[in-house]
Amino acid sequence: METEAKTYTIQELYDDLPISLVELGERARLNEVTVARIRDGKSTRRTSVNRLLLVLSEVYSKPLSLKNVSGINVQINRRLEKKEGKL
């Protein structure tokens, strides 16, 4: 992974991961299957994504969020969006 890059793909973060997926899941309090689903671009709840990005930020000592990591598919909360009038 390029050290000067300001944006990252979720795949490159996984490819360069210095810990196992099992440890990543444990540290993020996520099931290993959920960790793999996020890696594979499957739709995932925002809370799960936030937990994973928090741990990845610690692992890489870089601030990581949905703003600078691409390839993450966040599930749309239709009930919340309907309540807020976005749908």
Image (cartoon, rainbow, N blue to C red):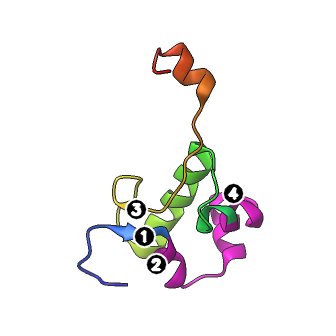
Which of the two marks, 4 or 3, is nearer to us in this view? 3
Which of the two marks, 1 or 4, is nearer to us in this view? 1
Which contiguous range is marked in magenta? 11-36
The disc labelled 2 sits on which kind of residue? Glu
Looking at the picture, how far across and down is residue 84, in whole percent? 48, 16
Compare marks 3 and 1 and give the one earlier in the sequence. Answer: 1
Q: How many marks?
A: 4
Above or below: residue 69 compared with residue 79: below
Q: Which mark is residue 69?
A: 3
- The residue at the point 49 percent across, 85 percent down is 16
Q: Are marks 2 and 1 in contact (CB under 8 Å)?
A: yes
Compare marks 4 and 2 and give the one earlier in the sequence. Answer: 2
The disc labelled 4 sits on which kind of residue? Arg
The disc labelled 1 sits on which kind of residue? Thr
Looking at the picture, how far across and down is residue 3, in whole percent? 29, 82
Q: Are marks 3 and 1 in contact (CB under 8 Å)?
A: yes
Task: Identify residue for label 2.
Answer: 12
Above or below: residue 38 compared with residue 49: below
Disc 1 on helix, strand or loop? strand
Above or below: residue 83 compared with residue 74: above
Looking at the picture, how far across and down is residue 67, in whole percent? 34, 53
Looking at the picture, how far across and down is residue 65, in whole percent? 40, 55
